[in-house]
Image: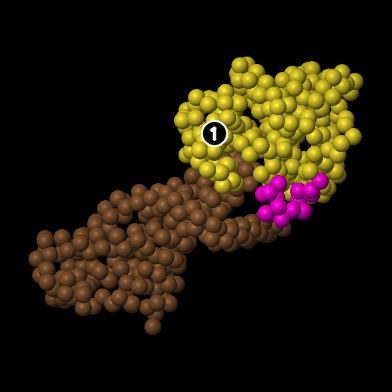
Chain colours: A brown, B yellow
Amino acid sequence: MLDQLALLGRIGLGAIAGLGRAHLLMFGLLRGLGDLWPRPLLLVHQIHSVGVLSILIITVSGLFVGMVLGLQGHYVLSKFGATQTLGVMVAASLVRELGPVVTALLFAGRAGSALTAEIGLMKATEQLSGLEMMAVDPVKRVLTPRFLAGFIAMPLLASMFSAIGVIGGYFVGVGLLGVDAGAYWSQMQANIDLHEDVYNGVIKSLVFGFVCTWIALFQGYDCMPTSEGVSRATTRTVVHSALAVLGLDFILTALMFGN
Amino acid sequence: MSTEEPLVKIRGLRFSRGERVIFDGVDLDIPRGKVTAIMGPSGTGKTTLLKLIGGQLRPDAGTIEVDGRNVHRLGNRDLYTLRKRMGMLFQSGALLTDLSVFDNVAYPLREHTALPKSMIRKLVLIKLEAVGLRGASGLMPSELSGGMARRVALARAIALDPMMILYDEPFTGQDPISMGILVKLIRELNDASRLTSVLVSHDVHETASISDFIHVISEGRVVESGTSTEITGSRKAWVQQFMGGRPDGPVPFHYPGADLADELMGDARC
């Protein structure tokens, strides 16, 4: 009994210490932002690696999600004779929820895991120690550009996801199921609010971008410097990011739309 | 030893990882302008000692002074200023894998100096020439052999003309030719650039051949210090076993365990 209590205590203390280290890293990342101004190329390279290389998976997924929304939405709306509002349903679902959330989940799987593996391997091969001994702060020089790149890339990727999704819904709703094209776009234009829907969606994706990139970088920076340690850290990045995104989505939705 | 103040002065160093005590009251001096080796069996904390000298780890107790400054009392900025005057050669080389050989050597110069591109190019080529790899400047780290990677890392470590270089197991896993090149380079660089070299290794013959002083550590303490000749001729049984590479002695061949006869007869007695 006492052993189990001690084990519980150790796990709790370990988790709290991990949270402490993660927050210390976050402060280091935020402090390093100022150092990026003289070196914009570091950021450009990372936006390419984290953002541009994720465009394919994001757009293809967005297209399919939009097409499924078109099909499912048409099925439900046809029961109420409201198929002309299909555009609103597709756009609202994407801009408010699916755009930020699915993009964040895909981002964690594609870019987040790559970030963790890269940083973890840099640690395992002593590249981060090497930088420290060259009097170069690895948090400022290696991690901060990746952090800012993730924060910038996420809302842009989510916007692409939503835009392509709306086109996917159009292909299915208008092209296959006979919804009027004018109604699809005009209903969407009339009922989607810039502040209520679009801005709130962008805020969500900014939060998800911050959290997913932070988790990915922390897991890489804090991992055991062995192949098994990097492998575990990569898995943890995807799991923790997915849970954080879904949990935060509920909190943000409640704050934004819960009266 | 010379009467000049040593470059690195370690006093009462204690360091442990969890329950395991790595250093238990280590006192050690590293004189200026010499090659000093720190030797000992695997797992005695030789690399840890280099990380403590470089300020990457903090001791539990004791002080480490480099050039008269207590490394662990320095703020981040002062520590980084001190590190610009130290080079470290990691066992793996620790080259940045996304940069070419040229860019790796140029990295500290670009980070810490405002030299024009043409000057950086010349300096990098001079450093690479010193390690015999000027012709490999366009290669990527993945295209280098282990020995070449270490020589590039050495060129990078001397890029800022440091006062001291810390070598972490430079000879491990090297073929005889690479090993010979590294041995020659370490000694020549030390003498030509008036460096202080700290060499951590358990390759007895190579290390003894180029070191001015040797400290042998075991079980968290310095067991013997002296010149190469003094250490090689030491009367202490432990040092004799280590330097002679004998399989049995004060460090037993057998891992401690139950008596063999008792263990073999264990089944019969059950």
Nearer to me, A41 or A218: A41
Provide the secondary structure element on which disc 1 rests: helix
Q: Is residue B186 above or below residue A35?
A: above
Nearer to me, A188 or A134: A134
Residue B57, position in %: x, y?
A: 71, 47
Nearer to me, B126 or B149: B126
Residue B237, position in %: x, y?
A: 87, 22
Q: Chain of mark 1?
A: B
Give the residue drawn at x 46%, y 50%: A42
Residue B248, position in %: x, y?
A: 80, 19
Residue A59, position in %: x, y?
A: 28, 55
Give the residue drawn at x 59%, y 46%: B113
Is-magenta flag for residue B74? Answer: yes
Give the residue drawn at x 47%, y 39%: B98
Position of A188 with respect to B201 (left or right) is: left
Q: Is residue A99 visible?
A: yes
Give the residue drawn at x 68%, y 29%: B169
Is-magenta flag for residue B196? Answer: no
Q: Is residue B1 above or below residue B180?
A: below
Image-quadrant location for residue A90 = bottom left
Q: Main secondary structure of the magenta part?
A: helix
Position of B245 with respect to A99 (left or right) is: right
Residue matched to label 1: B122
Position of A240 with respect to B223 (left or right) is: left
Query: Which residues lie in the magenta part?
Result: B68-82
